[in-house]
Image (cartoon, rainbow, N blue to C red):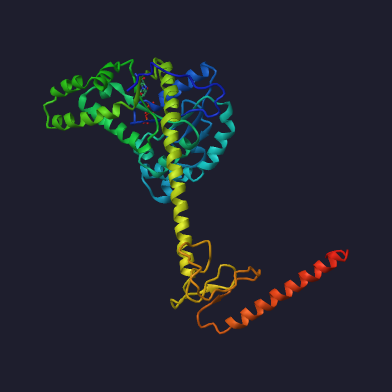
Amino acid sequence: MSTAANTTAPAAGDKRPPVILCIGMAGSGKTTFMQRLNAHLHAKKQPPYILNLDPAVASLPFSANIDIRDTVNYKEVMKQYNLGPNGGILTALNLFTTKFDQVLGFVEKRAPSLDYILVDTPGQIEIFTWSASGSIITDTLAATYPTMIAYIIDTPRTAAPATFMSNMLYACSILYKTKVPFILVFNKIDVKPHDFAVEWMTDFEAFQEALQKDKTYMSSLMNSMSLVLDEFYAHLKVVGVSAVTGAGMDDFLKAVDEAVVEYDQEYKPELERVLEERRLKQEAEKEEHMARLLKDMAMDEKGKEVSFGGKGHTSKKGKTPLRGMVADEDDDEGEEEEDDEDDGREPRYRDEDDSGDDDYEGYRIEEEERRNRMEDESLKRFLAGKRVD
Ligand SMILES: Nc1nc2c(ncn2[C@@H]2O[C@H](COP(=O)(O)OP(=O)(O)OP(=O)(O)O)[C@@H](O)[C@H]2O)c(=O)[nH]1
């Protein structure tokens, strides 16, 4: 776990602004946090580019550059598809995702002049974190930009060990699902400072002690869960902020810088490895299909072997029809071999009963002799000082 102390500033002239996906439980203060962050960045003369992905928000306290509500009317979606509010929001997000390549196009044009891209997500957290659209949007952004999740937590409401544990487990599930760098943002520290949370995350015994006070059946379950979470905490950046007073905003930006470094050092190489693995797998599949196709082409529908009349054709004893493309060739067994000369003809199929074989062979020999005669003629004309056509 890091607490945004040791940081590296983003490289000057970096054309890939970090994308900050703001996610959190309803009422955790996502929108207020975005508003505060927006104001803070404007004050620093680094105005962010804002995407609003919440189709159900009544009014935004900041202006979004791209707003899902301009594209989809979620109330109309509810009516048309006969859905409830959550189904309407999810369908609206799905519809918007089908246009996300256009959104990316807009972002791309602006990216060189931007320092930050902020994304507000639907209040119903699972609509973004557990939907296909949420994954597509996250993965698409993360393929190009250093993308991270700012997980907003309502600190006063997380002070009980059981609530804290539930919230951390949820955060853990999102981290393992998205795999992008993760910042835990303890919001509302003007009401309750987040020191207790940092202590519980860094000092295992302190959390165990807090758990001892809980005498319910849940405490033993939580005891074992807390062991699992220890590993998870190591991957997190933790900051305390107040979206109302503006406390902790610079700490948050330092954590963003750290997340960019983490993206470059861990996420991106892993992404490239996965893409390369996929490419190799596809290539291997293609080769396998080709080999199977060639094998199939060597057999006619009745299961008889067929061959091509052109270069690389098979002998009657049933060799591989396309030389050089399929392994397992053995050409010099003293069998009756056909001429390997490429005569430029289209390949033709035949089977062992092909009675036209001899005619064809005769024609080939005739053709070759004719070509040889022409070449001789041409040479004679050249030696006689005439132009060669
Ligand atoms: N004291 C205090 N209150 C805050 C802070 N941040 C947000 N709030 C309050 O928390 C409530 C919820 O804030 P929102 O920003 O609407 O939360 P949200 O997560 O966007 O909520 P949804 O729109 O339901 O997703 C509001 O009453 C805010 O004024 C904070 O840092 N300190």
Work out whether residue 376 or residue 156 is closer to the camera in this orientation and state it: 376
User: Compared with residue 359, is residue 280 higher up or lower down, i.e. above or below?
Assistant: above
- x and y percentages locating residue 169 in the rendered image: 27, 32
- x and y percentages locating residue 60 in the rendered image: 46, 29
Which of the 4 image quadrants contains residue 217? top left
Residue at image point 49% right, 26% down: 62
User: Compared with residue 16, is residue 5 higher up or lower down, i.e. above or below?
Assistant: above
Assign ligand 1 to one image quadrant: top left
Work out whether residue 74 or residue 306 is closer to the camera in this orientation and state it: 306
Furthest residue toward right: 385
- x and y percentages locating residue 268 in the rendered image: 45, 34
Q: Which part of the image, by quadrant, shows the N terminus? A: top left
Residue at image point 31% right, 16% down: 191
Q: Which part of the image, by quadrant, shows the C terminus? A: bottom right
- x and y percentages locating residue 319 in the rendered image: 48, 70
Which of the 4 image quadrants contains residue 122? top left
Which of the 4 image quadrants contains residue 216? top left
Residue at image point 37% right, 18% down: 242
Residue at image point 39% right, 30% down: 181
Work out whether residue 228 or residue 158 is closer to the camera in this orientation and state it: 228
Furthest residue toward bottom: 355
Q: Is residue 71 visible?
A: yes
